[in-house]
Image (spheres, grey):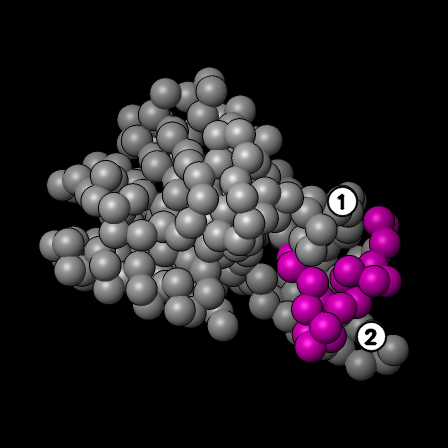
């Protein structure tokens, strides 16, 4: 467990805040892993688990956290946390991570806040393994819930090996956004030998996507996912 100081808080979407932390000691993790965040709330220590959006190459830790009334740490961070506050982090945890040499290419499939571990992978892989092509398929309920969209589009504009597509599952899409879910037709277009597929989002979305990929012939060992809810 290491001490950390909140250095920035910003409202990234209507439901998600991004928290940046300065850490007091080296903090090692693999892109795609998660951590425990310990907070003292009214004299009681509470803990919440969150995927990191920062790259292991960065000199800070970043979390993008969607509001949840039922999670006391999330509720505290959204409503009461302030820049300069100190708390404690512990991690990284989880077996759903990326490392060099794992794949000839990456296909990242995100639903909603499920983008968070995949953002860490994107930020890491585009720097550490720039010879590995990445494709991101990212669905959200509405255009304003696409987290880090500006950064993702800027990365795609300057890096020809990174491609991203945004989907809106409710209401009418706008601009370059596509309407509907990430279905079999969408997935068929990204099936390629040597790719590893990361899937993160709501449980039903993970189940349906993994089932589709398997039925399209992707070997189970090339599909990586981790359920949070």
Q: Residue at x 36, y 20 (%)?
A: 160
Counting from the top left corner in percent of width and height, residue 68 is at 68, 69
- Is residue 69 a member of the stretch shown in magenta? yes
Mark on residue 148? Answer: none
Q: How many marks?
A: 2
| Residue 86 placement (x, y as % from top left) | 80, 58
Residue 19 visible to an observer of this rendering: no
Expressed as whole percent of the image width and height from the top left, the position of residue 49 reads 59, 67
Q: Answer with left or right where residue 97 lies relative to residue 190.
A: right
Q: Foreground residue, 162 or 120?
A: 162
The residue labelled by disc 2 is: 41
Vertical position of residue 89 compared to residue 156: above or below: below
Work out how far the residue at label 1 is from the one at label 2, CA to CA, in angstroms.
21 Å
**Residue 213: quadrant of the picture:** bottom left
The mark that comes first in sequence, 1 or 2, is 1
Q: Is residue 144 above or below residue 210?
A: above
Question: The residue tagged with tag 2: helix, strand or loop?
Answer: strand
At 40% from the left and 69% from the top, the residue drawn is 204
Residue position marked by numbered label 1 in the rendering: 10
Q: Is residue 22 left or right of residue 194?
A: right
State the extent of the magenta-drawn residues as a range: 65-84
């Amino acid at each position: 467990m290491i001490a950390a100081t909140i250095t920035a808080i910003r409202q990234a979407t209507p439901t998600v805040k991004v928290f940046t932390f300065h850490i007091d000691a080296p903090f090692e993790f693999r892109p795609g892993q998660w951590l425990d965040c310990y907070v003292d709330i009214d004299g009681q220590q509470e803990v919440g688990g969150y995927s990191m959006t920062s790259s292991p190459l960065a000199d800070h830790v970043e979390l993008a956290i969607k509001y949840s009334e039922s999670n006391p740490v999330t509720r505290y961070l959204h409503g009461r946390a302030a820049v300069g506050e100190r708390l404690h982090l512990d991690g990284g945890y989880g077996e759903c991570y990326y490392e060099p040499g794992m794949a000839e290419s990456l296909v990242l499939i995100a639903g909603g806040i499920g983008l968070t571990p995949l953002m860490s992978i994107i930020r890491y892989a585009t720097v550490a393994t720039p010879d590995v092509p990445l494709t991101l398929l990212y669905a959200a309920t509405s255009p304003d819930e696409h987290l880090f969209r500006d950064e993702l589009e800027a990365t795609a504009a300057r890096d020809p090996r990174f491609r991203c597509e945004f989907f809106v599952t409710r209401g009418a899409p706008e601009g370059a956004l596509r309407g509907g879910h990430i279905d079999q037709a969408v997935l068929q277009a990204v099936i390629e030998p040597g790719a590893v597929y990361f899937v993160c989002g709501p449980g039903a979305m993970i189940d349906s996507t993994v089932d589709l990929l398997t039925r399209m012939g992707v070997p189970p060992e090339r599909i990586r996912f981790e359920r949070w809810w």
